[in-house]
Image (spheres, rainbow, N blue to C red):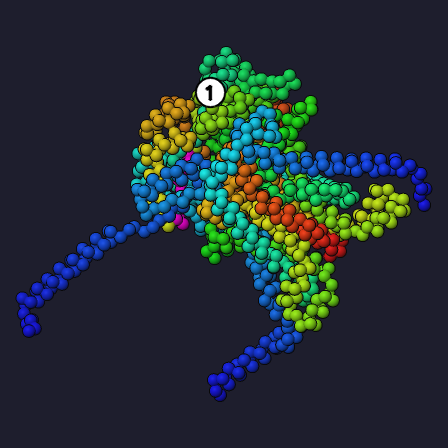
């Protein structure tokens, strides 16, 4: 018998409908929640060997915690990453994350996504202000998520020091030159066999300018380019700049504690043919593996006439706009920088994280020399400065390197203040020309 | 007319023997000197790090070690890199073996308008290195969706301008009568290419194959730009794993390199006579 | 018309059209045209899109100021080229390339020829020597440059200086002395290429009929005279080929110079730039793609010039 369509029945039918809908809706929600999140593969392009290994080593742990996310990290060493990004990004192709220096990101600023608010807050809360300032635009948009910082410190061979009767590392540049004279050694034919203070006099593009800038320019109160409003101009065509070049020339040709034609850098220090040199924290790991018996200490950069400071160049992660997984990328980046992973990074991979609010005691136990680097970030009166934040900066430094390298070869510049002044002034002309070409030259 | 020299036979023989000896001495010493850097590379692959950066460079290791080879798979998936290089080089070489021979045949034996201009254009492009026009090439790959793929890696290597030049010079020397006779017999052009041109050009084809193989194997900038993840790396890109930011791992690089040149070396030794004849014959036609 | 009839008519129409375009069915002319269309045209098509069009785009770019740092690209006419003359780094790069070609090419040709001539005088183990000389050629360029970096290392760490030192001679700044650095790289380049030319010349020499040489020996000619008057003239086409080949690769040399100028034990600076490394630097480091293309243009013109001159001097084509 068919039910009569009475109001009572209608209500129950409506109720039934509503209830069914509710149940269906509920079931759907539950089903949706139970369905696995979309499969994501985060592609990372790493520039440094250590970053690559770090991410590859940690990736399984992250995937364990986030089962739908896979990490695919590839190493593009040295200049290869620059080449690759120069072709890929403008062509609209790229990875999810790039391991980059904040200065390297500047030319590509239109192609990267600025960090979302939670990432920005993480940086502001956990890293010194210098990190945020270096990696953000004038409007406070964060273009590079800071991870580690490249600071320079003075390595010195304690055995050589003891032999020369020196107890403490030099406190300022004049002392450094004095010590270097005592520490240098020669063979009977006059060839230098041990550099008192190893100077970066050849090779490697803008790195050469960087070492010069860090050792003798900034401490003497000279900048490569001075900021005037939002424009720039060359800052070293003056007495202080000339004094900086003089330091190198004297070291090579007057006091002769260093020579062009000899082994340089970490290799030289590890082999014991250099008593002092300035470099970053990766050397500690290198020495532990290649010269484990070497006895050395690490000190903060020597003071100059005007300042006591060191370079703090930030490297971190940029997320290109072409990435289809930006949210996951930012989450992964913040995970890479959490307390536990940061400590692991410093201990096992050698580069110095920006975060000062992490317990690095495990790292210090294995590599005590690393403590000096981290202390440098917190020492009162020890100024930290970044690369100038303008796109032609790398070009300026690179072109300066050519000229500096040529100048270092000129023995005739010893006791030749006019010659030195000429070199600096010619170099400054070129620097200003580059700034002008890029429409950022100050009047 | 030169005056005949009266020299005792024994002296002559001694002179000849001395000449031979000096010849051998010269050749042996120069060729060994020549190969010495390669020997150093080979021995370095068996050295420990302390042996490599030392005050006194030594040829032989003080302690032999296989660590540099053993660590290769740990450092990076070198087997995959090797296979990728093989794929790229092989496919590329197959393309150019067929394409250059066919094009060489047409340039040598056919007549058509603009042939000279076209041939000159091809030669002109030999003068321009690949990295000069890498950006337009990459844009094409991207439009085709071939980034990070074998197709992308192989794309620009399927053409070898100098190969076309080579083959044309060589095929010029094949007698026209041979070809005409085959045509009279009813052979299609394809059959002529396959049955006459290819067999007679076996040597120069082998030559451009080796040249192309070496070229594609050593190619760096193109695979760098195409590969977005390491599973598409070739061996040359794999060498990056030994270049830390400031230091080179000589031992590792030399081990990877030694393994890399083994296949080329074997191919060369096996086909040596063929190749040498082929390389030279080409030049002869000038 | 039945269905079958319709198909026949269509087939006939198709055949007629083909005939009018390609020629009589089965004729040689048609065979050739078919071959051309199905083989040559695709190859030339590939050539067009892989080489010609990209190159034209790049050459066009040299007339613009295309740069990553500039949001809008505009035509600048010959500006880039005019700038080249004032650019000391371009000028030094150009002269370095020039020097490279002038030194490397003769060394490769003369060296290759000399060794090939020696090997051709019926030497035992000829194959052994050939292989040794050819080995450097098949070694990829990056490892080669790294090996030579070690040889040229400063102080006693490099093999070259170590040997000099042991012999009591003064050490040389192979890569740090600007006067020597380019020559040092040229030595490496020649070392790598020489075997290729030894092999090329050797078989060319072998192809010279033995009677020619015997005839000159009967005439009382010395070995050197025999070479001058018999071998060399007959080898002219092959020498031309060698010249052109080595010139092309000397002008565009890149990897060797690039790898040798990295690192802190080596001299940086414009001393060690050649045209192709300058192109690379402008395009990838300074992001001035338009300017970099202009340098490419110059590289192209000069290598073309050299090649044409060689053809004029030595051969027919």
Q: Residues within 10 Å of mark 1 (few under 14, many from 20)?
A: some
> Which corner quadrant of the image does residue C157 belong to?
top right
Q: In this figure, which residue is indicated by the disc labeled 1?
A: A296
From this viewpoint, is residue A194 visible? yes
- Residue at 89% over, 47% down: C218
- Residue at 43% over, 39% down: A52
Q: Is B217 or C73 nearer to us in this picture?
A: B217
Tell me where the magenta segment starts and ends, as one range: A314-323
Name the secondary structure under disc 1: strand
In the rendered structure, the answer to whether residue A191 lies left or right of residue A432 reads right
**Measured along the vertical axis of the image, is residue C7 above or below residue B162?**
below
Q: Measured from the top left, where is residue A263 in percent x and y? A: 57, 26
> Which corner quadrant of the image does residue C152 belong to?
top right
Count of picture labels:
1
Secondary structure, magenta segment, majority class? strand
**Measured along the vertical axis of the image, is residue C159 above or below residue C213?**
above
Q: Is B51 or C124 nearer to us in this picture?
A: C124
| Quadrant of the drawing holding the C terminus of chain C | bottom right
From this viewpoint, is residue A140 visible? no
Please check the rendered image and state whether residue C173 is part of the magenta-colored stretch, yes or no: no
Q: Measured from the top left, where is residue A411 in percent x and y? A: 63, 24
> Which corner quadrant of the image does residue A118 belong to?
top left
Q: Measured from the top left, where is residue A122 in percent x and y? A: 31, 37
Residue ranking furthest to the top: A165
Query: What's the chain of the residue with tag 1?
Result: A
């Amino acid at each position: 018998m068919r039910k009569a369509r009475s109001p009572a029945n209608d209500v129950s039918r409506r109720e039934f409908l509503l209830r069914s809908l509710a149940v269906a809706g509920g079931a759907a929600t539950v089903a949706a929640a139970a369905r696995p999140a979309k499969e994501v593969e985060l592609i990372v392009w790493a520039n440094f060997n250590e970053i690559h290994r770090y991410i590859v080593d940690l990736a399984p742990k992250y995937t364990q915690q986030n089962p739908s996310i896979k990490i695919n990290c590839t190493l593009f060493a040295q200049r290869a990453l620059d080449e690759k990004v120069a072709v890929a990004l403008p062509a609209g192709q790229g990875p999810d994350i790039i391991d980059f220096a904040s200065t390297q990101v500047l030319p590509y600023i239109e192609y990267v996504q600025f960090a979302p608010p939670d990432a920005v807050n993480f940086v502001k809360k956990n890293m010194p202000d210098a990190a945020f300032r270096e990696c953000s635009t004038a409007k406070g948009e964060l273009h590079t998520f800071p991870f580690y910082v490249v600071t320079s410190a003075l390595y010195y061979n304690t055995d050589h020091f003891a032999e020369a009767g020196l107890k403490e590392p030099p406190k300022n540049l004049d002392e450094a030159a004095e010590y270097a004279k005592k520490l240098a050694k020669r063979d009977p034919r006059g060839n230098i066999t041990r550099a008192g203070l190893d100077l970066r006099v050849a090779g490697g593009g803008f790195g050469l300018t960087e070492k010069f800038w860090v050792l003798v320019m900034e401490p003497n109160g000279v900048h490569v380019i001075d900021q005037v409003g939002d424009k720039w101009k060359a800052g070293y065509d003056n007495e202080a700049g000339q004094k900086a070049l003089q330091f190198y020339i004297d070291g090579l040709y007057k006091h002769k504690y260093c020579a062009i034609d000899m082994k340089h850098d970490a290799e030289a220090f590890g082999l014991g043919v250099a008593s002092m040199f300035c470099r970053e924290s990766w050397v500690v790991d290198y020495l532990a593996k290649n010269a484990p018996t070497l006895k050395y200490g690490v000190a903060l950069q020597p003071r100059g006439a005007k300042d006591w400071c060191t370079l703090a160049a930030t490297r971190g992660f940029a997320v290109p706009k072409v990435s289809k997984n930006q949210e996951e990328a930012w989450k992964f980046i913040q995970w890479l920088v959490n307390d536990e992973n940061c400590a692991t990074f410093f201990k096992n991979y050698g580069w110095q994280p920006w975060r000062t609010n992490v317990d690095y005691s495990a790292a210090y136990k294995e590599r005590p020399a690393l403590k000096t680097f981290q202390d440098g970030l917190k020492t009162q009166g020890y100024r930290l400065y970044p690369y100038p934040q303008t796109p032609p900066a790398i070009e300026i430094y690179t072109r300066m390197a050519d000229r500096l390298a040529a100048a270092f070869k000129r023995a005739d510049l010893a006791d030749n203040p006019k010659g030195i002044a000429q070199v600096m002034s010619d170099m400054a002309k070129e620097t200003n020309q580059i700034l002008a070409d890029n429409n950022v030259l100050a009047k | 007319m030169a005056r005949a020299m009266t020299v005792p036979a024994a002296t002559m023989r001694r002179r000849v023997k001395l000449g031979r000896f000096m010849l051998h001495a010269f050749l042996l010493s120069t060729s060994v000197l020549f190969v010495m850097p390669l020997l150093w590379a080979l021995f370095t692959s068996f050295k420990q790090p302390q042996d490599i950066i030392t005050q006194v460079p030594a040829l032989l290791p003080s302690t032999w070690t296989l660590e540099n080879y053993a660590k290769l798979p740990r450092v990076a998936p070198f087997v995959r890199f090797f296979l990728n290089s093989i794929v790229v080089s092989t496919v590329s070489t197959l393309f150019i073996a067929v394409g250059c021979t066919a094009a060489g045949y047409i340039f040598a034996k056919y007549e058509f308008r603009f042939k000279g201009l076209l041939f000159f254009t091809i030669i002109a492009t030999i003068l321009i290195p690949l990295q000069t026009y890498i950006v337009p090439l990459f844009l094409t790959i991207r439009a085709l969706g071939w980034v990070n793929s074998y197709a992308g890696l192989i794309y620009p290597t399927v053409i070898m301008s100098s190969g076309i030049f080579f083959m044309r010079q060589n095929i010029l020397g094949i007698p026209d009568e041979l070809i005409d006779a085959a045509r009279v017999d009813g052979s299609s052009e394809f059959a002529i290419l396959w049955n006459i041109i290819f067999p007679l050009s076996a040597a120069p084809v082998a030559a451009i194959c080796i040249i192309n193989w070496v070229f594609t194997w050593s190619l760096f900038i193109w695979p760098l730009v195409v590969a977005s993840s390491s599973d598409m790396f070739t061996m040359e890109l794999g060498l990056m794993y030994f270049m830390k930011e400031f230091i080179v791992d000589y031992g590792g690089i030399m081990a990877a390199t030694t393994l890399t040149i083994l296949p080329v070396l074997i191919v060369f030794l096996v086909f040596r006579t063929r190749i040498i004849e082929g390389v030279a014959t080409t030049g002869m036609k000038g | 018309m039945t269905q079958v009839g319709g198909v026949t008519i269509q087939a006939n129409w198709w055949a007629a059209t083909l005939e009018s375009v390609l020629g009589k069915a089965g004729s040689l002319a048609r065979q050739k045209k078919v071959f051309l269309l199905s083989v040559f045209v695709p190859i030339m098509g590939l050539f067009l899109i892989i080489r010609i069009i990209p190159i034209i785009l790049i050459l066009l770019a040299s007339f613009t100021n295309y740069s990553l740092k500039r949001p809008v690209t505009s035509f600048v006419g010959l500006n880039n080229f005019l700038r080249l003359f004032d650019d000391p780094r371009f000028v030094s790069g150009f002269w370095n390339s020039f020097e490279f070609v002038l030194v490397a090419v003769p060394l490769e040709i003369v060296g290759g020829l000399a060794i090939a001539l020696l090997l051709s005088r019926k030497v035992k183990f000829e194959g052994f020597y050939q292989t040794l000389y050819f080995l450097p050629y098949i070694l990829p360029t990056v490892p080669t440059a790294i090996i030579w970096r070690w040889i040229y290392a400063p102080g006693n760490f490099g093999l070259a200086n170590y040997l000099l030192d042991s012999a009591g001679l003064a050490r040389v700044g192979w890569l740090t002395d600007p006067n020597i650095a380019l020559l040092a790289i040229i030595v490496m380049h020649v070392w790598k290429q020489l075997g290729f030319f030894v092999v090329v010349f050797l078989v060319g020499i072998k192809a010279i009929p033995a009677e020619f040489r015997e005839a000159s020996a009967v005439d009382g000619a010395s070995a050197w005279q025999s070479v001058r008057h018999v071998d060399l003239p007959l080898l002219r086409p092959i020498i031309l080929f060698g010249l052109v080949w080595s010139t092309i690769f000397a002008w565009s040399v890149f990897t060797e110079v690039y790898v040798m100028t990295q690192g802190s034990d080596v001299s940086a600076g414009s001393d060690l730039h050649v045209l192709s490394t300058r192109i690379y630097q402008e395009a990838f480091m300074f992001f001035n793609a338009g300017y970099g293309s202009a340098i490419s243009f110059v590289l192209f013109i000069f290598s073309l010039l050299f090649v044409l001159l060689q053809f004029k001097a030595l051969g027919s084509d």
